[in-house]
Amino acid sequence: KRSYKITLLPGDGIGPEVISVAKDVLVLAASFEGIKFEFREMLLGGAALDATGVPLPDETLAVSKESDAVLLGAIGGYKWDKNEKRLKPETGLLQIREGLKVFANLRPATVFPQLVDASTLKREVAEGVDLMVVRELTGGIYFGKPRGFGTNENGEETGFNTEIYAKHEIDRITRVAFEIARKRRGKLCSVDKSNVLEASMFWRRRVQEISAEYPDIELSHMYVDNAAMQLVRYPKQFDTIVTNNIFGDILSDEASMITGSIGMLPSASLGDSGPGLFEPIHGSAPDIAGQDKANPCATVLSAAMLLRYGLGEDKAADRIENAVLDTLNKGFRTGDIHSAGTKLVGCKQLGEEIMKSVDSQAPAV
Ligand code: NAD
Ligand code: IPM
Ligand code: MN
């Protein structure tokens, strides 16, 4: 029997609601493959601030580092929005990504046939979209120095950040993206703003140079403003996209809406070694928190990515993904993806339906 140590970070808002569902689905699906888990639930974000005074307690990072994989809900909320930078829930999230050195954030956006009508795009535009955003996660303007608040030469107040990438940071994310493109449809589009930004000029040059190692991959470059437009004009042109931290943040939220809802998109954040961090791309959704309205699919599918990319347990991952599709096939929907003729359910009930679908799959021999 295989056993893994999993750290759970429910966080804030809808985080605990979606983590509770994802944990149950994970345990059940893995049990059919003879896999066991040892869970430790730790504090992150606003929940950690309220309990300990900091958004990432040392113990949370230490336990996360010692585990085989980390599953995160979401962090943030109105209550902490005006906190100074050091004491923001978001700072805790950035610190754990940095602490685990998970520089490669994989954000797949797949339009399930069952949800084509939940997309805000026309059927013929959304149908068949299957793309992967490879977002650099531990560099760029999120972490660049100098940063802060100051005063300019006129004595006026300022706020400033620095978009900076070192060669090794671009090289490693580029190689991850090429490898992913190779396992997909062999196309990579690097998104930048190299018509304006030096950091992007350097990015494009390194991507171009590294492409020599991948002659089998069709590489293209696109400015980010055009990419934002192309994503809603004709998203099927994209296979794998590689981009910096902030552009990847924005483009992945945009891509989520092609699939029907941000409540559907999972992610995997990986480093060179050590545990991966798995989380939905959405936030704590304070507008629907505590109302059993959240779509748990993004987190459930993040648990599938945890099995696949974090533990190499592909069969258990397949079970979860199949169960989500089966549940959608049966017509169950949370409010964000609900449309005429489908069955509106809450977060908990959708979770129970996913569990039934896991159960109804043939047991492993
Ligand atoms: P958000 O993603 O939390 O919500 C945006 C909209 O999408 C809201 O209307 C919300 O109700 C809806 N939504 C999000 N997830 C959903 C789900 N699973 N099911 C149904 N509807 C869903 O983004 P926001 O409102 O800009 O940010 C809210 C808070 O979350 C902020 O504090 C922000 O910093 C934080 N945040 C955290 C993460 C993270 O933990 N990784 C990501 C993004 C935002
Ligand atoms: C995300 C979020 C985070 C980010 C915030 C909350 C720090 O938007 O995970 O996409 O910008 O990376
Ligand atoms: Mn985001």
Image: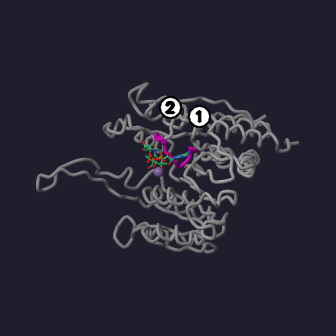
> Could you say where residue 254 lies in the image, as x and y percent from the top left?
50, 59
Residue 339: x %, y % from top left? 63, 53
- On the question of residue 39 being in view, the answer is yes
Q: Which image quadrant: the C terminus?
A: top right
Mark 2 to mark 1: distance in Å? 9 Å
Q: Is residue 36 magenta?
A: no
Q: Are marks 2 and 1 in contact (CB under 8 Å)?
A: yes
Q: Is residue 280 magenta?
A: yes
Furthest toward the top, the residue is 51
Magenta highlight range: 276-287
Relative height, residue 212 to residue 251 (above, below): below
Residue under label 1: 7
Say whether residue 128 is left or right of residue 107. Answer: right
In this orientation, which residue lies closer to the viewer: 40 or 336?
A: 336
Q: Which residue is mark 2?
A: 60
Q: Amino acid at mark 1?
A: Thr
Residue found 60% across the figure and 63% down from its top: 131
The way the protein has been coloured in the rendering is one colour
Image point 25% across, 51% down: which residue?
159
Q: Please tell me which of labels 2 and 1 falls first in the chain.
A: 1
At 54% from the left edge and 60% from the top edge, which residue is drawn? 255
